[in-house]
Amino acid sequence: NWGRAAARIGCTNVKVDQNKIDIFLNSTPVFKAGNPLSFNKEKLNKEITKNKGVKIIVNLNLGKASGSALGCDLTREYV
């Protein structure tokens, strides 16, 4: 649920411009320059199921620094 990722960004102390935020699920862009994008949900779901996981990439477009985090139990039953 990329919407949760976008919502959590707004809960931080980091000054961000929501019009610069890009979010990808694996290599599929779902949010660009602060706007949701149309994408093939069935295709993405099959890819995630096949790979047994998803990589969520959030680009704040604020500079060159980066970070990463691991999560678990993002199954349908949990989410």
Image: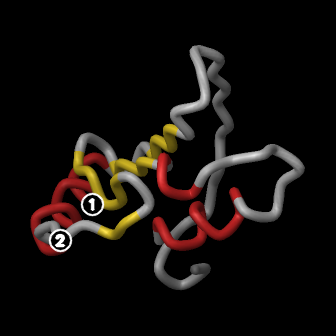
- Identify the residue shown where x is 68% and y is 47%: 16
Q: Which amino acid type is shown beneath numbered disc 1? A: Thr
What residue sits right under mark 2 in the picture? Answer: 38
Question: Residue at 25% of width from left, 41% of height from top?
Answer: 27
The amino acid type found where label 2 is placed reads Ser
Closer to the chain start, of discs 1 and 2, is 2
- Would you place residue 23 above or below residue 43 in this image? above
Q: Position of residue 3 (x, y in %)?
A: 51, 72
Q: In which quarter of the image is the C terminus?
A: bottom right
Number of disc labels:
2
SS for dot 2: loop
- Say which element carries label 1: helix
From the image, tell me which residue sits under label 1. 49
Q: Where is residue 43 drawn, in percent x and y? A: 10, 64
Residue at x-position 67% and y-position 26%:
67
Give residue 47's position: percent from left, percent from top. Answer: 19, 54
